[in-house]
Image (tube, coloured by chain):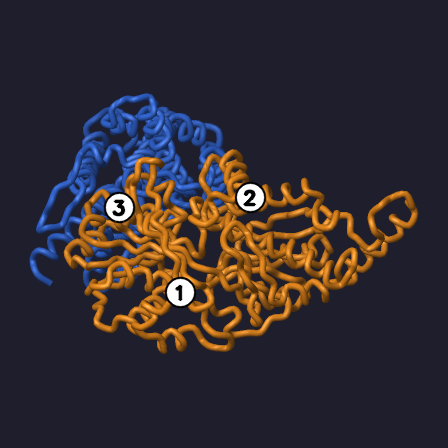
Chain colours: A orange, B blue
């Protein structure tokens, strides 16, 4: 606060000394933001695409003249260095005044550490990727906003898609990573499934260790058990290995796989992911988004991204786009509503309340508890031959509002109150591909 | 638990044990001869896997048959041994043989960290997967469960061949006998004209080739990504310590125990499967601190 005040005063003096300059006095030279992402470690499959995307988007905004003439300057912190290094780097960045707004983070554990820290440091923090539903259910925050959904709507949409497309399955098994996300996502999924289809039998629950290089034994056992459906909320190398090994041994032919994070692995899985398996994307994120793929902004960004990285976009790219759209939207709204050249922190926070913004997907709205309401896209894998990997068909986009736990309620308690009628009553848009 | 399930768990355990053994073999050989615990072994494993995937991808892109993936594994393993293993011993480890164990451990750990970053620089952070070799061999069905021939038959076969080959090499060839003699008493061996430096270099290269081979053989079955070396070094260290450092037959038996323990745990009590290797290690070391086959005097760490 003091730092930014000093900076603004200095900026004002500099501007005053140069009367020919057109820039208004209270505008900073640049809007400095910090973003945390895994640049190393297994989760860099998400962090690196998000960083690349954020750089492109910031460059694009700056090329258009920045926000009200102020260019954005983005700096990255590596979450892969561990929570301790992350928090001290985060604190240093904020306290030294080198970031006005923070975008953090990918890991749910890091989000839970950073939320109170941001509150303490009084720095606006946009949670751009982490999944845990606990953040706003267990605490109230003034400075922390989430520009995307959370685990509850993501898992609920998956259950609904499964029940809509495979209404008659009888048995299920789960193979999730043994850490918070693997356990929490199964809690939500199984609770929702029990509420909406109580007769389903859970044949096996596997939680192989995070980063496991081999799922052969689990696959043998799954082949012996023959469940109708196999759920795995794994991601990155773990998901790739599991699906590849399962595909090699024909498990994909005998069971329907439900993979809520597979959108981020489609390209790497190549031909291993055969037709007929359920693919999720942690929101309406898909490089062939049925409603967005013909829009100019979408097409030009996808082209830029593919040119820069050589890969197609995955969901962290969309999440990054939402956080940056929220940032830009909040500043522009605050400037307009207050009739100022540059908003104060209080004006910025006020603008974030109830803000609606649009990144690469559908528009997202921040609810009164600062949780974003984001729609959920799922589809079924199909090898069409247009790409050397599986794409999606029978796509459904679920309305995020109906799937998000109401303000002030606990997700697991709320999910228990749902029933089978939701499968038919939920608002959903369907697309062939 | 009926017989079919018992056999399935047995197959899974053996396939898993085979891979662990191949990596542990190199680690225990190096320790047995040089008395140095080479943490960088994990990096050599990872680089072996990365090299195989890159070479295989390149050869396939040129339009050659996927069966060439097999000779490429051997090429990759030898490349790892000669290009990385050789210079590592010659320029670095040679200088620290008479230093304290803690320093040796720190040096090899530093090499491990450096090589981890080298992998990231060369291959980036995105996972690689190339299962051409595995697909060439096809599948086999046992009790209605499909296995890959690669994992069920080829890997255990290679492990057995390596075990027997290593025994034969150390006991019945001149070079092997020189290595054994240097291991027994370095000074006495030198006094009768054995070039201990050369023996150490050779042994280290063999050990590094085995690490690379482990990675090469693992590559068609798993995602190749940063951090894979760290997991493997921890597991193969557990095998080597349980067996008794420097014990080759012991490493084979321990790898088998750990592989079977893990797979039976997945069938009976999945929550235990991560714990099993270390549980076996703790139980064995409580009863025999020098390891299953180790002699108390041989222990250094």
Q: Is residue B18 visible?
A: yes
Please name the residue that numbered disc 1 is placed on.
A427
Tell me where residue B127 sits by quadrant.
top left
- Cα distance between the residues tagged 3 and 2: 31 Å
- Neighbor class of circle 3 (other Cα within 10 Å; few <14, some 14-19, many 20+) is some
Q: Eyeballing the image, is B183 above or below B14?
A: above
Tell me the distance, in whole angstroms, between the alpha carbons under discs 1 and 3.
26 Å
Q: Which mark is residue A275?
A: 3
Do tags 1 and 3 sit on the same chain? yes
Please name which of the two marks, 3 or 2, marks the residue nearer to the observer: 2
Q: CA distance from mark 2 to mark 1?
A: 27 Å
Chain assignment, label 3: A
Circles 2 and 1: CB atoms closer than 8 Å: no
Q: Position of residue B252 (x, y in %)?
A: 22, 44
Element assignment for label 2: helix
Quadrant where the N terminus of chain B is found in the figure: bottom left
Question: Picture quarter containing residue B141?
Answer: top left
Residue drawn at the location 10% of the way across and 47% of the way down: B142
Does B185 sit left or right of B119 as displayed? left
Q: Is residue B143 left or right of residue B213?
A: left
Label 2 marks which chain's residue? Answer: A
- Would you say the residues marked 1 and 3 are in contact, meaning their CB atoms lie under 8 Å apart? no
Residue identified by numbered label 2: A297
- Residue B204, given in percent of the width and then of the height, sits at 36, 32
């Amino acid at each position: 606060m003091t730092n930014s005040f000093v900076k603004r005063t200095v900026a004002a003096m500099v501007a005053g000394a140069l009367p020919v300059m057109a820039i208004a006095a209270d505008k900073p030279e640049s809007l400095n933001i910090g973003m945390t992402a895994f640049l190393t470690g297994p989760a860099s499959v998400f962090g690196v695409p998000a960083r690349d995307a954020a750089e492109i988007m910031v460059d694009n905004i700056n090329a258009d003249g920045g926000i009200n003439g102020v260019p954005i300057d983005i700096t990255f912190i590596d979450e892969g260095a561990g929570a301790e290094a992350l928090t001290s780097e985060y604190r240093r960045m904020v306290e030294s005044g080198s970031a006005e707004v923070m975008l953090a983070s990918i890991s749910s554990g890091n989000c839970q550490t950073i939320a109170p820290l941001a509150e303490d440091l009084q720095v606006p923090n946009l949670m751009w990727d982490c999944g845990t539903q606990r953040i706003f259910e267990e605490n109230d925050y003034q400075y922390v906003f989430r520009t995307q959904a959370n685990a509850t709507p993501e898992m609920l949409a998956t259950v609904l898609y499964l029940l809509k497309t495979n209404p008659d399955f009888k048995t299920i098994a789960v193979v999730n990573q043994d850490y918070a996300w693997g356990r929490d996502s199964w809690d939500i999924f199984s609770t929702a499934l029990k509420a909406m289809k109580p007769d389903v039998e859970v044949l096996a629950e596997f939680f192989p260790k995070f980063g496991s290089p081999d799922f052969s034994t689990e696959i043998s056992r799954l082949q012996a058990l023959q469940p109708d459906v196999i759920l795995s909320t794994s991601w990155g190398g773990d998901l790739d290995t599991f699906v590849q090994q399962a595909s090699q041994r024909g498990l994909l032919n005998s069971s329907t796989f439900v993979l809520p994070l597979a959108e981020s692995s489609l390209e790497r899985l190549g031909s291993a992911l055969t037709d007929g398996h359920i693919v999720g994307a942690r929101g309406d994120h898909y490089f062939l988004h049925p409603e967005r793929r013909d829009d100019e902004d979408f097409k030009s960004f996808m082209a830029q991204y593919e040119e820069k990285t050589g890969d197609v976009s995955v969901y962290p790219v969309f999440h990054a786009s939402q956080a940056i759209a929220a940032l830009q939207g909040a500043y522009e709204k605050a400037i307009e509503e207050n009739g100022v050249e540059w908003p104060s922190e209080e004006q910025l926070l006020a603008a974030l309340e109830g803000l609606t913004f649009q990144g690469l997907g559908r528009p997202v709205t921040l609810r009164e508890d600062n949780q974003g309401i984001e729609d959920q896209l799922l589809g079924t894998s199909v090898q069409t031959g247009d790409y050397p990997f599986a794409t999606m068909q029978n796509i459904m986009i679920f309305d995020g509002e109906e799937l998000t736990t109401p303000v002030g309620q606990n997700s697991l308690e709320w999910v228990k109150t749902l029933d089978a009628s939701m499968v038919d009553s939920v608002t959903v848009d369907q697309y062939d591909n | 638990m009926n017989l079919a399930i018992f056999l399935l768990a047995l197959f899974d355990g053996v396939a898993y044990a085979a891979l662990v053994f191949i990596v542990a073999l190199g680690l225990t050989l190096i320790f047995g001869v040089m008395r140095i615990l080479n943490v960088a072994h994990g990096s050599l494993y990872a680089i072996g896997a990365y090299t195989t995937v890159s070479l295989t991808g390149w050869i396939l892109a040129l339009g050659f048959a996927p069966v060439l993936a097999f000779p490429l594994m051997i090429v990759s393993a030898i490349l790892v041994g000669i290009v990385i293993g050789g210079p590592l011993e010659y320029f670095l480890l040679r200088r620290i043989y008479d230093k304290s164990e803690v320093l040796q451990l720190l040096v090899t750990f530093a090499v491990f960290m450096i090589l981890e970053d080298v992998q990231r620089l060369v291959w980036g952070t995105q996972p690689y997967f190339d299962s051409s070799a595995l697909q060439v061999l096809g599948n086999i069905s046992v009790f209605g469960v499909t296995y890959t021939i690669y994992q069920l038959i080829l890997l255990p076969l290679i492990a057995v061949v390596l075990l027997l080959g290593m025994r034969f090499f150390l006991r019945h060839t001149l070079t092997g006998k020189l290595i054994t003699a240097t291991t027994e008493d370095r000074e006495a061996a030198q006094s009768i004209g054995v070039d201990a430096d050369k023996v150490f270099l050779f042994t280290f290269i063999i050990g590094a080739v085995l690490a690379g081979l482990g990675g090469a053989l693992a590559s068609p079955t798993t995602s190749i990504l940063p951090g894979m070396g760290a997991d493997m070094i921890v597991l193969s260290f557990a095998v080597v310590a349980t067996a008794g450092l420097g014990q080759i037959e012991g490493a084979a038996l321990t790898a088998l125990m750990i592989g079977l323990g893990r797979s039976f745990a997945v069938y009976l009590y999945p929550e235990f499967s991560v714990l099993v290797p270390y549980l076996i290690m703790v139980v064995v070391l409580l009863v025999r601190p020098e390891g299953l086959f180790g002699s108390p005097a041989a222990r250094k760490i």
